[in-house]
Image (tube, helix red, strand yellow):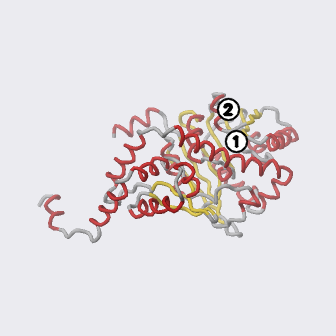
Amino acid sequence: MSAAALRATQPEPPGLLDQLAGLHKALADNLRLQILRLLKNESFGVLELCRILDIRQSALSHHLKILATGRLVSTRREGNSIFYRRAFLCDEDSYREIKKEVFDSIDDLPLPNAQRKKIKQIQLERSQQSLQFFERNADKFREKQGLIVEHSHYANGLHDIIDGLGLSADARVLEVGPGEGQLLVELAAKFKHLSALDNSSDMLDKSRAAISTAGYKHVQFILGDTDVARAEKLRVDLIIFDMVLHHIASTARTFLDAAALLKSDGFLLIVDLSTHAQDWVRESCGDLWLGFDDGDLDNWAMKAGLEAGQSSYLGLRNGFQIQMRVFKKPTIETKKMFSDS
């Protein structure tokens, strides 16, 4: 008996038609398609989506509920706020291909300029919120960070990962958000070509002072974000975000920028918190995001053309968990090999 004939003899899974009906209902609305288009790479809170779409919160909540019923969006809690993102496509989903075709179709449609400007403004406000925190607390940064974790708690594991990448001393390395320069000094002892990137001049001065005190003179300091580094056409073998990603307004864009900065076979190393519910870190530590799920990081990396590599996790006594994740930029030959297979 053929596979098709065998499937025809099997009973229909309960609720499958209901799921399909819910999916088509969710897709049969212009505004809901706009929401899905906005969530291509980013996650937004309800109030942020209201601003972008110029819609009342009650009306938006109605549409988000329908999208959630159709399993097209998922949520994550950030303190008292709920953020929405597109649901991840998984092989077990009976309607994966339908969703993929719809996502691909709406992703080909450009965002209206008005929405694009509002998104840029929201990201700017997020960035300013983080930057203002560091400007106010530059002298207390280590104390604030120490409320969550000390660098010494995970430094050995971090250096084991860096050493395991097999990079030579001539490799070009970029640390984003070096803070007071603890890791930067350790990296200066390993690599001859090292750059430090920070959008806070006060924090960059602290890193510069730490490097000077340690007696190193081969570190380049850049004021700005990854967009500035791209404009300067920086190309590196390793980019490190050490407890920084949760301060960045647009994590999805950061992955795209990192991929552009990396050479082929280069590595992106993310050290950050796993998802948690300790909302006090927003005010006390300036965090924009309450950690990250593995799936979030994997999804952003995939969309940036990066491949997930090794990972390590460290639970802390205060309830936080540190995750260390490596992502690699494949060579053109590797991409072609996989696309042909």
Q: Is residue 309 visible?
A: no
Tag 2 near tag 1, CB within 8 Å: no
- Which residue is located at x 42 percent, y 59 percent? 67
Q: CA distance from mark 2 to mark 1?
A: 16 Å
Image height of 332 relative to 290, above or below: above
Write down the residue under mark 2: 170
- Which residue is located at x 49 percent, y 58 percent? 60
Write down the residue under mark 1: 175
Quarter where residue 321 is shown: bottom right
| Number of the front mark, 2 or 1 | 1
Dot 1: within a 10 Å radius of its alpha carbon, few (fewer than 14), some, or many (20 or more) residues? many
* Near-viewer residue (322 or 112): 112
Quarter where residue 155 is shown: bottom right
Which residue type carries mark 1?
Answer: Glu
Q: Residue 189: horizontal and vertical position, in percent?
A: 76, 40
Q: Residue 134: horizontal and vertical position, in percent?
A: 78, 49
Point out the image quarter for the C terminus.
top left
Tally of marks: 2
Dot 2: within a 10 Å radius of its alpha carbon, few (fewer than 14), some, or many (20 or more) residues? few
Residue reaching furthest to the left:
1
* Near-viewer residue (206 or 183): 206
- Which residue is located at x 57 percent, y 43 percent? 253
Q: Counting residues from the N terminus, which is met first, the one under dot 2 or under dot 1?
A: 2
Q: Secondary structure at mark 1?
A: strand
Q: Secondary structure at mark 2?
A: loop
Which residue type carries mark 2?
Answer: Asp
